[in-house]
Amino acid sequence: MNKKEFKAIFKKRLAEKYAMEVEDATATELYQTLGSIITDSYSPDWYQTWQDYRKQKQKQVYYFSIEFLPGQMLKSNLLNMGWLDIVEDALADMNIDLADLAAVEPDMALGNGGLGRLASCFMDSIASRGLPGNGNGIRYQYGLFKQKFVDGYQVELPDEWLNQGNLWEVRKESKAVNVHFGGHVWMKKMLDGNLKPVYEGGSKVRAVPYDTGMVGYQNQTVNTMRLWSVEIPEEEEDRYRSVEERRAVEDLTSVLYPDDSNEEGRNLRLRQEYFFVSAGLQSILRHYLQLHEPIDKINQYVAIHINDTHPAMCVAEFMRLLVDEQNVPWEKAWDLTIKVMSYTNHTIMAEALEKWSVGMMKAVCPRIYQIIEEIDRRFVVETSWVHGEELVSRTRIIQNDQVHMAHLAIIGSHSTNGVAKLHSDLLKSVVLHDFYILYPDRFNNKTNGIAQRRWSQIANPNMSRVLDKTIGTSWRQNSNDLRLLLNYQDDDTALDALAVAKRENKIEFANYIKETTGITVSPDAIFDVQIKRLHAYKRQLLNLMHILNMYFDLKNDPTLEIPARVFIFGAKAAPSYHYAKAIIKVINEVAKLINNDPAINDKIKIVFLENYKVSLAEKIIPAADVSEQISLASKEASGTSNMKLMLNGAVTIATLDGANVEIRNFVGDDNIAIFGLTEEEVYRYYQDNSYNAGDIYNQNEKIHRVVNAFVDGTIPNILFEGQEIYDSLIKYNDEYFVLRDFDSYLAAQKTIEVAYLDTRRWRQVSLQNIANAGSFSADDTVQKYADDIWQIEPLFSHNDERGTTHGQYLL
Ligand code: 26Q
């Protein structure tokens, strides 16, 4: 499709849809028009992809995730269809700025953070590799809450993302299934001697899928992300008469739970988990039976991935479908289940490991509980005599009246992986060590990756153009080719061009900051960025304490020669996470204090942007100079913003945690600022119990001064919040070793300052980071999942066979 053809199609479509001319249409109308052209255009390929998988009986993976976080899809669909440049150009001819249309699309924010965004990066890469893979999740009516600051406090508002409709989704009425909740189950002996479950009471809801096309990068593959929405089944209409009864059903897919690892599981969350697990597996099984292959070969056609433990009931529900509904003997069903299932762990924080009370699980899904009990019983019998009762008592699924979901996922699958080398090693050696003894072959690592094209080509067109000029365009297809940049580390033309692109991005972002917050920042300052959920272990507090220390140094000596810095934060706190909210309040008050102190002479600026989300990340990251990755070593499973910032030329200041370790190994010690305790040192402290934060506080003058600032009135308006932070450090002995790492962090920040002042050196460091970032491509990560875990392959020569191009159906 060329520009001229697109313009004709666009005008025709606008007239058909809205009876309008381009000049009269609003951005929303233009966006809807463009969107409908896009979906119409990829639909034939979507249909064809599915037909091909079916005809060739291709083994497919189903990625079960309670969160997906695609953000906006307009530009990524255009890019993947190969249309982005033509459309941008054609629209410009009609006096339309594509950016204005893109801005109209609400973020699809059906996820909290890293885990949900990873799922969406994987969806893009699975399609882009031409791999047969599908997403399975929940279509929440409300995404992650919208964050506002009122008097420096976080306030949560509902995210009504569906208000204007969602043009990417297709409701598939005909594919609906029923999901059963509650009641009682007993086993009835049938004439053939088999036991059949008999359900008494309880209720049925209808699960209706909404499918979204996952367009592969210029390869005619369009996969499916299937999200389930609850409805009242027609045959049950008269059972749910009152408004309250109907509301209780609709609640099921109403809101995404905010990441609150500390909160005890709630009944509604458990029902959400069973809902999308049961609906997804039923639809997979129904499709499989249509292939007319014997049920005991299902593992050759289906792989199911459990993204964290939230969908771990897949293990039991799959058993139920095989045993109860397909009459597969238990042993055979169990063998198939293990072959089909695989599981990724995303956390080592003990309080985040999911457990459900037996009582609640019995009430929500009684048959699933029975099956889990039977899995657990057999596990105990079969494992005790080899490994002894002690190990079994620690690894069994049901303990102290609680169902341990990670245990279910590991026992019921053939693969358990962590998301960075360090994390996977810690799973084997510490967190899941007992299971590693039982199943050493099941454990493996799959370091996370990112959707490179979104985080470079879409987010950072300025840098992308420089890359094209410098190393050619092959990096757009294969991000490993970014390595070609290494040939230019002494080339001043390339270094300058990259610096110019960075400066353009900083100016653009400075304007955005001005518009949204009123704060003026200079593009000459270092843009220092920490963007991630607010969590004690991520240590936004350490960052803040460094800022306070700088502030005091400057107050003592206003002539101090340091490069100006803008500290940029983006972070949401779980609504009930009191401590995290206190940190937000204090950062906001420190910002007010420092930003308005004339003595500081703009040497420090603090900008805490409201409502951090994918589309905001796409604005911040291209403008970043410094990437803050400062979690306590061993606590951040991987991190993925570290990879996105690196790709955009930011220099990382980091602890040896998660994927930071691998970033360091790629760029080398000269191109990253590492500080802080190592994971071994942290564990040694745990072991000998020797950490004493009070001692550090008493002996270290700088720390004393900074910590006191939280309670001595230096920072206005933070009476309770300041005290809470002070207490966490001094009274409760600083759980995340903030004081212990403080000096080392300061030293690393100094090396950043020194490096920044050496302009050429800084540009070289930045180039090194871009050049090595290709190693963290989700395309490669999913390929490893496909080869090692799922055993799936791209469609057999599908490009030759179809050879269709997007757009031909429109003309
Ligand atoms: C817990 C209880 C109740 C309701 C929700 C939750 C909940 C929700 C989301 C618990 C955890 C999450 C999300 C966790 C997460 O995003 N983990 C991150 O996963 C990334 C991808 O692997 C890693 O890079 C990060 O290191 C890890 O923190």
Image: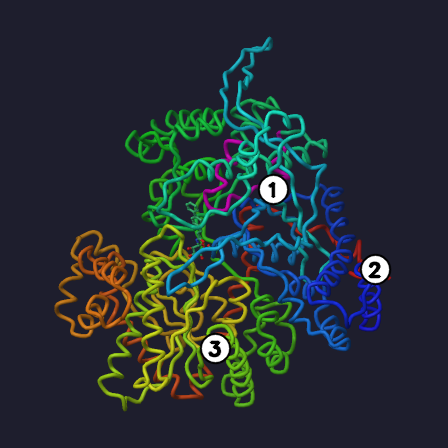
Q: Is residue 771 visible?
A: no
Q: Magenta segment, which residues?
A: 296-317
Residue found at the far front of this picture: 242
Task: Quote the CA–CA distance across marks 3 and 2.
Answer: 51 Å
Q: Nearer the viewer, residue 229 or 811?
A: 229
Name the foreground residue: 457 vs 508: 508
Up-down relation of residue 510 to residue 288 (above or below)? below
* Image location of residue 420, percent across then percent down: 43, 57
Residue 768 numbered mark, or none: 3
For discs 1 and 2, the disc positioned in front in the rendered view: 2
Question: According to the image, what is the colour scheme of the structure?
Answer: rainbow
The tally of labels here is 3
Disc 1 crowd, CA 10 A, few/some/many (<14, 14-19, 20+): many
As shown in the figure, which amino acid type bears the numbered disc 3?
Answer: Gln
Image location of residue 724, percent across then percent down? 25, 58
Which residue in the structure is indicated by mark 2?
16
Q: Which mark is residue 228?
A: 1
